[in-house]
């Protein structure tokens, strides 16, 4: 895809971020090859935003990625420019005006309504912290921001009011550990990635263990402040707090955010401090801002898959996948009566039987594009007892085999797999307290005979979600179709029925960290009755490795 990155211009603004060392600006092309997506950077000034956006929109792009961040009091493009961009009726990723218009005061009000824990301004309780209500990047924060008595608070308030005419927030300073977690939208769901805890030098005073402007941009950069991944119940609790904070703001379509939190010393209570609309992702390789580390080390498929997840989510929210889903459903409704006979004679059946005989599939399984229940059938024949949840786009396929009712939990989820896999049903309905990456929803996730219908962006997003949801294994098959065959189908059936060869895409996706590729084979699948092509495919089986604690040196760019 061709994607326009729209940035706020710092030129001549005197913004603290104007120095390149503070904000070298995000650019996904640092991580994503041009063969997958092309990114073009554009800059917009606050003074001439409408005219500059009008010119940008004359060019042809598939998506616009909004990185403008200025609020009314800032001298860089932001809220007003974003409103004008949205008026163009174009597909925009991230930073909607509904999010950009919010301040810490809005979060405090939302927290009160939703029962979210935030620091209060408790009378007579000290220390307090004084900060801007509508700022980012720890702007205006230094060690004098923490005040130990009423006079210190008054002095700090007076100082900040002299510097800038913006609302201020005075609240209790929570003594404890500083943490953050990225949250991303996946389709209609929201998940949190692995949280980071900031590790301050030994001997740091408790009232100075927070991210001042200097600490965020200098101490992290030079390694004085480092990071550790949250683990165990602490990880789960931080993820839940981050997701709850994002949802409390009711900003569907915002794509992502980073939630800053503190873990109170002694009580271990989590306090939400802020929801930042732009995580520090796609910055120069080796940067020490933290968020790129989280993506590289914990997101399946890393930066490319994250970008495709953002794109796929926006496409799902806009309903751009629905026409193809309807076409596929109609096709398989007609094909359903003869499907099982064709399946029994195919190489795909043999692939599934081999995997069932060879590997563990016991426990809970999610079967994407479950069709007439072939996976349940071969597992039963292999003597494997499993609880299988199915997703299927064609109701006709479900009506043509008793196996779908014999071996699968009912009801089967009806809908496009690329949309339905994104919904963490078991988290939101059965285990509302167990949120995060939704890891551990199923022991095994499988998909056979269907991934070739997904365009590359959707394929990468679905694959990433499969790894996010699986406790033990991920198994699937990729059709290795020659170009002459996919071109024939394109000419015969049209663009909506386009088939894709994802062999190169799976190679680019790689083996996610914490996983092992235990099986890869190239197998005959079927002979096309239309063209005579012999179609082969790759069978894959990945298994999750035993958990180990990530050390800083494992990440390659941390002290």
Image: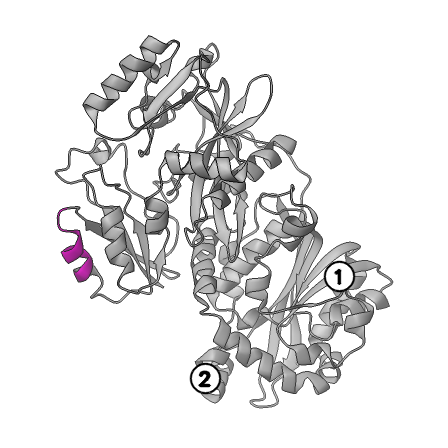
Snapshot quadrant of residue 150: top left
SS label for mark 1: strand
Q: In this view, does 500 lie to the left or right of 408?
A: left
Magenta includes 191? no
SS label for mark 2: loop
Write the start and end of the magenta stretch as one range: 47-54
Magenta includes 52? yes
> What residue is at 13 percent from the left and 47 percent from the top?
47
* Residue where numbered disc 2 is placed: 494
Cα–Cα span, label 2 and label 1: 34 Å
Which dot marks residue 56?
Answer: none
Q: In which quarter of the image is the N terminus?
A: bottom left
* Residue 524 image point, x, y percent: 66, 75
> What residue is at 84 percent from the left and 60 percent from the top?
384
* Residue 19 image point, x, y percent: 21, 33
Q: State whether residue 518 appears in this view.
A: no
Total marks placed: 2
Q: State whether residue 535 appears in this view.
A: yes
Residue farthest bottom in this picture: 530
Which dot marks residue 388?
Answer: 1
Residue 480 against residue 69 in the figure, above or below = below
Residue 535 against residue 314 in the figure, above or below = below
> What residue is at 48 percent from the left and 54 percent from the top?
305
């Amino acid at each position: 895809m061709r994607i326009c990155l729209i940035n706020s211009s710092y030129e001549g603004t005197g913004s603290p971020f104007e120095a390149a060392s503070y904000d070298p600006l995000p650019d996904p092309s640092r991580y994503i090859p041009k063969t997958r997506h092309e990114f073009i950077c554009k800059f917009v000034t606050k003074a001439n935003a409408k005219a500059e956006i009008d010119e940008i929109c004359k060019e042809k792009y598939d998506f616009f990625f909004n990185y403008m961040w200025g609020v009314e009091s800032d001298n860089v493009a932001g809220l007003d420019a974003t409103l004008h961009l949205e008026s163009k009726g174009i597909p925009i990723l991230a930073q909607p005006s509904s999010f950009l218009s919010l301040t810490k005061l809005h979060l405090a009000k939302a927290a009160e309504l939703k029962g979210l824990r935030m620091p209060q301004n408790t009378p007579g309780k000290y220390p307090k912290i004084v900060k801007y209500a509508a700022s980012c990047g720890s702007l205006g924060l230094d060690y004098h921001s923490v005040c130990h008595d009423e006079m210190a608070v008054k002095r700090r308030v007076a100082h900040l009011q002299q510097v800038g005419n913006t609302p201020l927030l005075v609240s209790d300073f929570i003594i404890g550990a500083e943490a953050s977690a990225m949250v991303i939208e996946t389709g209609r769901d929201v998940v949190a990635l692995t949280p980071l805890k900031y590790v301050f030098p030994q001997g740091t005073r408790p009232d100075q263990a927070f991210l001042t402007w200097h600490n965020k941009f200098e101490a992290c950069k030079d390694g004085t402040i480092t990071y550790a991944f949250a683990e165990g119940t602490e990880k789960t609790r931080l993820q839940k707090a981050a997701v709850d904070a994002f949802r409390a703001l009711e900003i569907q379509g915002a794509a992502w955010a980073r939630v800053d939190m503190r873990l109170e010393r002694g009580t271990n209570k989590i306090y939400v401090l802020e929801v930042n609309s732009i995580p520090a992702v796609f910055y120069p390789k080796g940067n020490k801002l933290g968020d790129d580390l989280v993506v590289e080390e914990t997101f399946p498929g890393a930066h490319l898959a994250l970008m495709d997840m953002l794109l796929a989510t926006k496409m799902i929210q806009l309903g751009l996948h629905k026409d193809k889903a309807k076409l596929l459903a109609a096709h398989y409704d007609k094909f359903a009566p003869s499907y099982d006979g064709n399946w029994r004679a195919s190489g795909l059946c043999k692939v599934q039987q081999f995997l069932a005989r060879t590997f563990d599939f016991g426990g809970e399984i999610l079967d994407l594009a479950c069709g007439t229940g072939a996976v349940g059938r071969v597992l039963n024949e292999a003597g494997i007892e499993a609880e299988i949840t199915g997703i299927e786009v064609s109701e006709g396929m479900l009506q043509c085999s008793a196996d779908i009712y014999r071996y699968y939990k009912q009801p089967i989820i009806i809908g496009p797999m690329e949309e339905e896999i994104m919904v963490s049903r078991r988290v939101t309905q059965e285990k509302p307290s167990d949120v995060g990456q939704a890891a551990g929803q199923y022991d095994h996730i499988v998909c056979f005979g269907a991934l070739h219908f997904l365009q590359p962006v959707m394929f990468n997003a679905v694959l990433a979600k499969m790894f996010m949801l699986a406790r033990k294994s991920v198994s699937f098959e990729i059709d290795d179709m020659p170009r002459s065959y996919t071109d024939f189908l394109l000419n015969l059936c049209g663009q909506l029925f386009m088939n894709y060869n994802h062999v190169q895409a799976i190679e680019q996706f790689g083996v996610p960290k914490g996983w092992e590729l235990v099986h890869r084979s190239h197998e005959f699948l079927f002979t096309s009755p239309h063209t005579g092509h012999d179609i082969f495919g790759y069978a894959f089986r990945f298994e999750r490795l035993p958990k180990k604690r990530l050390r800083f040196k494992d990440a390659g760019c941390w002290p």
